Image (cartoon, rainbow, N blue to C red):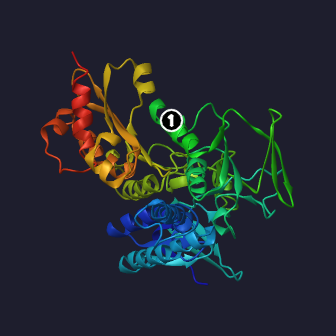
Amino acid sequence: MKDQKYDIIVIGSGPGGEGAAMQAAKLGKSVAMVERDLPIGGGCTHRGTIPSKALRHAIFQATTLLNNKLFRDAALSRLPEFPELRRTAASVIEKQVEMRMGFYDRNGVDIFKGTGSFVDSNTLKIIDEFGGKRTIEAGAFVVSTGSRPYRPKDIEFNHGRVFDSDTILDLSETPRSITIYGAGVVGCEYASMFRNIGSKVNLVNTRDQLLEFLDDEICDALSYHLRDRGVLIRNREEYDRVEPTDDGVILHLKSGKQIKTDILFWAAGRSGNTDGMGLEPLGIEINSRGQIPVNEDFQSAVPHIYAVGDVIGPPALASAAYVQGRYAAHHMIHGSCERAMIEEIPSGIYTSPEISCLGKTERELTAEGVPYEVGHSIFKSLARAQITGQTVGMLKLLFHRESLQLLGIHCFGANASEIIHIGQAIMSQPAEHNTLMYFVNSTFNYPTMAEAYRVAALNGLNRLF
């Protein structure tokens, strides 16, 4: 087919690709989007963030009704099976795809379905599902092809009882028991979900503690509440081999332990989707996990080929990927971009309860010799939490003892991923306006969860002398 030329070609329509395409189009450039798996939206919309969070919400609604004395007799007599809970995501995905297609249509971004690979540094070959080929050209590229679950070669992922995050959503029934190998964000989120629908959960962690990049107090709280719900956590363990059987899966650990459950969910790492893209001949080396090394402006070894999102590795958040895409597009067009948008990105972890954090941990501040203090607000003391019954959790503020500047915000509990943004707004201000006193001197609606900021700020001030 006849070649077409664009200013910018984006490969992959997940959050990073969408952010790059929309930003470039808004800045007046001609843009093409190449997507292997239509409908658009990438793994985030179809296999990751959207379906898993919709599933989590369905589980929350069902368990809330089942456990509520007011509605127990009239509502649910049992929890729906896994496929029933999973179906609630279908309408959300459909709405997300329809909305995103509108973005591309309104901004004049052409969409090409097929697998893209580089012919040279300015030419991309696209092969569609029927084997049809075409080439398109551009002056700059954004690779945003995302990632997939890492699959060790010695594990039978085609066995009906062995799953990863791409296949777990296709379960035909709720398992009575599950072993989750890998206690990162995905592993911890699914451990919460499966325990909440009644499965016996073994969570195998290769590290010393859960999510050790978090503040220690949050790590401890997560471990406590998962165990309190009945999750069996095994820290500092590594697999030796996986033995699928007709009636379950046996996980053999190097310590000599053996764990047998109905199914195994492998949640240990991800690999970048860079296979067959023709990057190496251009001088772009790919690391052992299929990820593209980039500089601080998301440029690869070939300066006009940028990469964003999961394909470059951590933080591997949909929110981070979107702003990385916007940043890359702005940088390639104007040669610079405001760095504030890619710095201090909050994390959102959708365990039960949620976790969200921003800035430094106590461990980091101690290592850096920063004189800090801590302010706490325990949710069980808040009127709004008592009304809703969601009393588990806390808000923790870390601030400089002398300047009162906010240094870190850590939240564990219901709606933590929403609550964090109040503090983010203050932390993003210039130093003289980033102060704990904002929360002391502001009036918060009552009763609200936002009030936790005032309580935590006053608690912290009371520690000063």
The quarter of the image holding the C terminus is: top left
Q: Which of 200 and 417 is in front in this view?
A: 200
* Residue where numbered disc 1 is placed: 219
| Residue 219 as seen in the image, left or right of residue 243 | left
Residue 70 vertical position relative to residue 39 in the rendered view, above or below? above
State the image coordinates of residue 222 (x, y, percent, origin top left): 51, 40
**Residue 140 in sight:** no
The image quadrant of residue 370 is top left
Residue drawn at (39%, 67%), measured in percent from left and top?
22
The quarter of the image holding the N terminus is: bottom right
Query: What is the three-letter code of the residue carrying label 1?
Result: Cys
The image quadrant of residue 129 is bottom right
Q: Which of 426 and 34 is in front in this view?
A: 426
State the image coordinates of residue 258 (x, y, percent, origin top left): 81, 41
Dot 1 falls on a residue whose secondary structure is: helix
Residue drawn at (37%, 43%), measured in percent from left and top?
343
Residue 70 vertical position relative to residue 202 in the rendered view, above or below? below
